[in-house]
Amino acid sequence: MPDSIVADSNPDAPVIVRPMRDDDAEAAAHLLRAAYGTPDGGAIAAAGAPDLPLTASRVRRWRQNSAAAWIAEVPGFGPVGAVFAVVESEAAWFAGLGVAPNFRGAGVGSALTDRVVDFLAASGRLVSGMEVAPTAMAAAGMYARRGFRPADLTVRLRGAVANLCERVEPNSWREVACSDLNCQTPGRKPALVARVKSQPHSSASYVLIGSNVTLLCDPDPLIPAAGGSLDLRLAVAGVPRNREVDAWIRAAARSASLRSLASLDIDLALADGVVLRRLLRLGLTPIASTIRLVSNLEAYLDWRSRNGPIGRWSF
Ligand SMILES: CC(C)(COP(=O)(O)OP(=O)(O)OC[C@H]1O[C@@H](n2cnc3c(N)ncnc32)[C@H](O)[C@@H]1OP(=O)(O)O)[C@@H](O)C(=O)NCCC(=O)NCCS
């Protein structure tokens, strides 16, 4: 694959698509803030705004956690678009696609999408996709024309850590802090574990031994304490029981309170009705939703049935 390609949809404004570098972080953060600040902003805006700080450090971290990331550059103007690719053991997806508002409609978004989709296809993973805000019409149309189909509706729930700690019942499982889940999850598919392993900044994990739930708390050092959140990775074997969901929330809330985080954000597929009902009863409130689109629905559903119902898909 060449290092850069030229988008040919607007010959007057050639667009170079090239791998993102560390020193692109400032410009990429700037253009992504502009891209996602518009009314049709995509998954990042819907899921994280207004408290997701799209800083250069965050963009740098995304790039480091991604299998690949690209910048679209118009000579004379610098970076005008960006996208990130994530590859796991079976699934692959992309996130953070954004084009600066002044440069839209010139093929930049298509060039970035084609580049990342080619990359995901070459990774050989069965499932590839992304999440898009229901209001992001341009993006949804662009993906649909490239064969992506809706697979899930996801919801982001938020709860105050103090309330969650009060409401959940005491844990009946042994909690251990660990850094490597392989030895702690006998018989469990390691897809979600791989996601954590690919994150060099993960600093703490918890496993609820003896339950059907494997929980990984992945504190994000870049999110400020007030109103911050915690990245969670969860693998569930079958449908979890209420007390397993409680145990998971309890461990997550405790980990958050240890880090003085005020709130906890959880992404969940709407189809996971049992878990959703329990989380709502525990006082979590829906704050945003996204549509999960995939390139191979059959493979996605198969992956989902093998890897459990819950998991963060985008970052
Ligand atoms: C989505 C986005 C990346 C598209 O970037 P872009 O450079 O304007 O895209 P392109 O010029 O390549 O156009 C892509 C397609 O969308 C169509 N399109 C562009 N703007 C559109 C609009 N406002 N409404 C409907 N369709 C539109 C184009 O006709 C083109 O169609 P094609 O697939 O048939 O070629 C850009 O609008 C954006 O940054 N949006 C905000 C962030 C976002 O929603 N990101 C996606 C989150 S997953």
Image: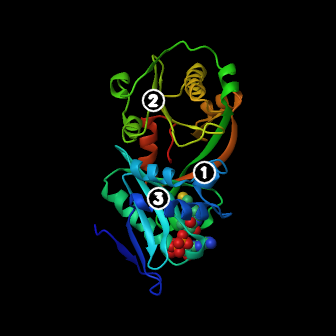
Where's the N terminus, which quadrant? bottom left
Is disc 1 placed on a helix, strand or loop?
Answer: strand
CA–CA distance in space, label 2 to label 3: 26 Å
Sooner in the amino-acid sequence: mark 1 or mark 2? 2
The structure's colour scheme is rainbow
Is residue 161 visible to the viewer in this orientation of the structure? yes
Q: Nearer the viewer, residue 139 or 68?
A: 68
CA–CA distance in space, label 1 to label 3: 26 Å
Label 2 belongs to which residue? 204
Label 1 belongs to which residue? 290
Label 3 belongs to which residue? 25
Of circles 1 and 2, the one toward us is 2
Of circles 2 and 3, the one toward us is 3
Picture coordinates of residue 164, whole percent (x, y)? 67, 25
Q: Crowding at label 1, few (<14), some or many (≥20) Cα neighbours within 10 Å?
A: many
Locate ligand 1 by image quadrant: bottom right
